[in-house]
Amino acid sequence: MMPDTSAAEREFEARIAAGETIEPKDWMPDGYRKQLIRMMSQHAHSEIVGMLPEGNWITRAPTLRRKMGLLAKVQDEAGHGLYIYCGTETLGVDRAELIDQLLSGKAKYSSIFNYPTLTWADIGAIGWFVDGAAIVNQTMLAKASYGPYARAMIRICKEENFHKRQGYEIMATLAAGRPEQRRMAQDAVNRWWWPSLMMFGPSDKDSPNSAELTKWGVKRKGNDELRQRFVNLTVAQAQAIDLTLPDRDLKYNAATDNWEIGPIDWDEFKRVIHGEGPLNRERLAARNRAHADGAWVRAAASGYAAKHAAEATSDAA
C-alpha cells in the first residue's frame, strides 16, 4: 500500500508546530526538501564566492597580523561552504550537481559578493557589515527545523563573530587614524551599507519563499525583522567610532525603539541577483578557473578512493 501522504503531512506539520527537529531519515514533504536544497546550496555558494573579494587582499594586507587574520577568515569561509554542502547531501542531492549549477550561473549566491573591494577599508566594512548581517541571519538559522543545517550554524556563528570583530577593529583603527585613513573608512561605509541591507532579501510581502520557509520552521523570523535588528545594532557601533551611515532618512523612533531607514533601491538588488552587478561575470569566471585548476586534485582523490576500495574488496575476498 502507498503511504497516506496527507496523514504524513499532518504529522510533519504537527512536529514543526511542536518545535521538533527534522532529521535526514525522517519523512518530509517534497516542497520542504526542495526549499532546503535551494536555501542551503545558495548559502554554501555564497560562502565559497565570498572568499574571492577578501582573498584578493591577502597579499596586500598592511601588516603580518592583518594578513594572518585575513588568511584565517578566508579559510573559515571555505569550511563554512563545505559544512553546508555536506548538509545538502543529507537531502539526497549530489554536491557536484550543486557546484555545476553555481559554475554555470544557474544557481544564486548572495548579491553582496558582486561588489568590488577597492581599498583595505573594504575588508573592514565586509567584516563589520556583511559578517554582522550574516550573524543576525544565521543565529536565527541555528534554530531551524532541519537538524543538519541548524547544527552547522552553531560553529559557523562562532566563527562569524570572530570575522565581525576583526572587521570592526579594522574600521575603528582607520577611523582613529590619519585624515586619509578616516576618509577611506567612511568611503567604504558609504559603498557597503546599502548592499548589506539588501542581503536580508526583499520585504516579506515581496519574498516568494519567506511564507513557506516560516511555515516549516526553517526561518524563525522574517527578512524585515532581521534587517531591523541589524540596523539597530549597527547604528550604535557606527556612532562609537564616529562614522556616518549614508542614509539621510535615518532616524530614531522612540515609540518603537527602532532606527528607521530610508528606502532601499530594490531595482539595484534585482539587477545584481540577475547577473548585472559590478563583478558578477568576474566572480563566476574566477570560480570556473579555480574549478578547472583543481581538476587534477579531484582526479587524484577519485583514483585513490577507487584503489582503496579495490584493495578492501581484495582483502575481504
Image (spheres, helix red, strand yellow):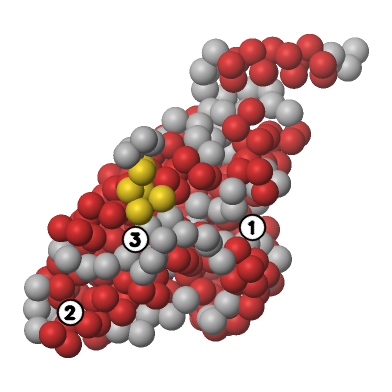
Residue 177 picture quarter: bottom left
Q: Which mark is residue 129?
A: 3
Residue 77 seen from this side: no
User: Does residue 248 appear left or right of residue 166 in this picture?
Assistant: right
Q: Residue at x 53, y 39 (%)?
A: 222
Residue at label 1? 98
Q: Residue at x 51, y 18 (%)?
A: 19
Residue at label 2? 182
Residue 151 picture quarter: top left
Kind of residue at badge 1: Leu
Instruction: Pinpoint residue 12: horizontal percent, then vertical percent.
Output: 67, 18
Within 10 Å of disc 2 (Cα), the crowding (few <14, some 14-19, many 20+) is many
Instruction: Pinpoint residue 245: horizontal percent, then vertical percent.
Output: 32, 65
Q: Are marks 1 and 3 in contact (CB under 8 Å)?
A: no
Question: Quadrant where the C terminus lies?
Answer: top right
Label 3, label 2: how far apart the Cα atoms are: 17 Å
Toward the right, the furthest residue is 1
Residue 268 picture quarter: bottom right
Q: Dot 1 lies on which element? A: helix
Label 1, label 3: how far apart the Cα atoms are: 28 Å
In the image, is residue 217 above or below residue 102?
Answer: above
Toward the left, the furthest residue is 177
Kind of residue at badge 3: Phe
Q: Residue at x 33, y 48 (%)?
A: 252
In the image, is residue 13 above or below residue 164?
Answer: above
